[in-house]
Each structure stands twice: as structure tokens, then as C-alpha cells.
């Protein structure tokens, strides 16, 4: 974690470890792994042999999760918007 201490306190890291990614979306690392495996959370990026997750991709994945009480998946496309 010493690398992150170099950041100003108001600047969040862009890439996070597996543990950081799981904590970011309020999951245990094991449950986070399940969601990555089934495609509900993004796959990691690689920096050499190290795996890291982009917080922007985590945000998008979290936004795509179903809303409690809604049986239909959330439509996030703009196909129904008339551009004219």
C-alpha cells in the first residue's frame, strides 16, 4: 500500500488490486472472483504479471447489476432515443 501513499489524499487510484476491487464494490474477494468468472464484474488488466482492475470498469459493472425488485435487466442502450 506504500505506493498509494504517494497520491494526494483527494486523488483516488485508477487501478486497484483484487482485494481493492472487491472492497470497492463491497464484496469479499472470493465472491468478487465468482462475479468476474461469470461476467458480472470485469476481467482484470495486466501490468506485467500483476492483475489490476480499472475503477471506471468496476463502476460500469456495478451500474449494470440488476435493481432489486426489477425482474427485467436494465436497458442501458440509447436505441430508443430519437436523435432528430
Image (tube, helix red, strand yellow):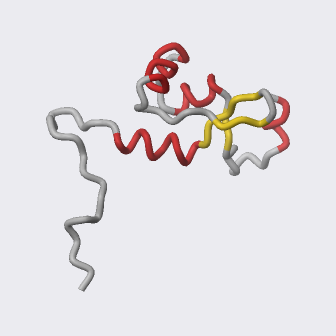
Q: Quadrant of the C terminus?
A: bottom left
Residue 74 vertical placement versus 5 (above, below):
below
Q: Is residue 62 left or right of residue 4?
A: left
Image point 79% across, 46% down: which residue? Answer: 7
Q: Position of residue 4 (x, y in %)?
A: 78, 37
Q: Is residue 69 left or right of residue 75?
A: left
Q: Nearer the viewer, residue 7 or 46?
A: 46
Residue 11 vertical placement versus 37 (above, below):
below
Q: What is the count of numbered marks?
A: 0
Q: Is residue 11 left or right of residue 40?
A: right
Q: Quadrant of the N terminus?
A: top right
Q: Position of residue 57 (x, y in %)?
A: 53, 44
Q: Position of residue 45 (x, y in %)?
A: 66, 37
Image point 71% across, 35% down: which residue? Answer: 46
Image point 55% across, 48% down: which residue? Answer: 56
Q: Position of residue 76 (x, y in %)?
A: 30, 54
Image point 78% across, 49% down: which residue? Answer: 8
Question: Toward which corner of the image does residue 61 lie, by quadrant?
Answer: top left
Please identify the residue farthest to the top as the structure is shown.
30
Question: Toward which corner of the image does residue 17 lie, by quadrant?
Answer: top right
Q: Is residue 13 left or right of residue 78?
A: right
Amino acid at each position: 500500500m506504500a505506493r498509494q501513499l504517494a497520491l494526494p489524499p483527494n486523488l483516488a487510484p485508477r487501478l486497484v488490486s483484487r482485494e481493492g476491487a472487491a472492497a470497492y464494490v463491497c464484496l469479499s474477494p472470493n465472491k468478487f472472483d465468482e462475479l468476474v468468472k461469470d461476467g458480472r464484474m470485469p476481467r482484470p488488466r495486466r501490468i506485467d504479471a500483476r492483475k489490476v482492475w480499472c475503477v471506471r470498469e468496476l463502476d460500469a459493472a456495478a451500474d449494470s447489476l440488476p435493481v432489486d425488485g426489477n425482474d427485467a435487466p436494465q436497458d442501458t442502450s440509447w436505441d430508443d432515443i430519437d436523435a432528430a
